[in-house]
Image (cartoon, helix red, strand yellow):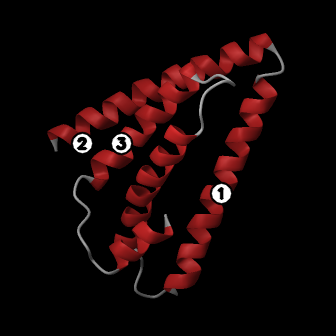
Amino acid sequence: MAAGAALGMAQVSLPYAELGIAASVLVLGVGILVVHRDMSPWPIVGLVLLFGACHGHAHGLEIPKSVSPALYTLGFVIGTAVLHIVGVVIGEVAALQPWLWRGLRLGGGAVSASGAVFVAQALLA
C-alpha cells in the first residue's frame, strides 16, 4: 500500500487501479468461500500485493494538501493492518464452530456478490 500511495502522491498513473480495487472485493469474497487450511499462501500474498498497490494508489491520489504525507500514509497503513488482523481473528474464531463457519461462508458470498457489482460498475465507467 505504501508503494502504491507513493505512486499516487507523485501523480504516476496506475492503469486499472479502480478496477483492481473493485476486483479485490470480489476476490476477497470468493476467497472466504473457498479457503481451507491446506491452501498455499503464495497466491494470496501475490494478490494482496497487487490489490494493496491499487488501494494505496487511490489513497495517494486523494491525499489532502494540508496533511503530512508520512503521517497520512502511516495512518491508512495501520488502519488496514488492523482490519486484516480483525479479519484473521474472525476467520480463526469461525473455524472453531461449524455454524460460525457457515455464517462466515454466507458473508463471503455476500461480499463476492457486492464485488461482482463493483467490478461491473468499474468496467462500465
Give the CA distance from mark 2 to mark 1.
26 Å
**Numbered disc in front, either 2 or 1:** 1
Give the distance between the C-alpha atoms of the residues marked 2 and 3, in whole angstroms.
Answer: 7 Å
Residue named by callout 2: 122
Among numbered discs 2 and 1, the one appearing first in the sequence: 1
Asked where in the image residue 115 lies, by quadrant, the reply is top left
Q: Quick check: marks 2 and 3 in contact, CB under 8 Å? A: yes
From the viewer's side, name the closer residue of 2 and 110.
Answer: 2
In the rendered image, the quadrant that contains the C terminus is top left
Residue plotted at (37% across, 48% down): 21
Residue 17 percent across, percent down from the top left: 30, 55
Where residue 65 sits: x, y (%)? Answer: 40, 86
Residue type at mark 2? Ala
Helix, strand or loop under label 2: helix
- Disc 1 residue type (three-letter): Ala
Q: Which residue is mark 1?
A: 81
In the image: residue 70, left or right of residue 12: right
Label 3 belongs to which residue?
22
Amino acid, disc 3:
Ala
| Mark 2 / mark 3, whichever is N-terminal | 3
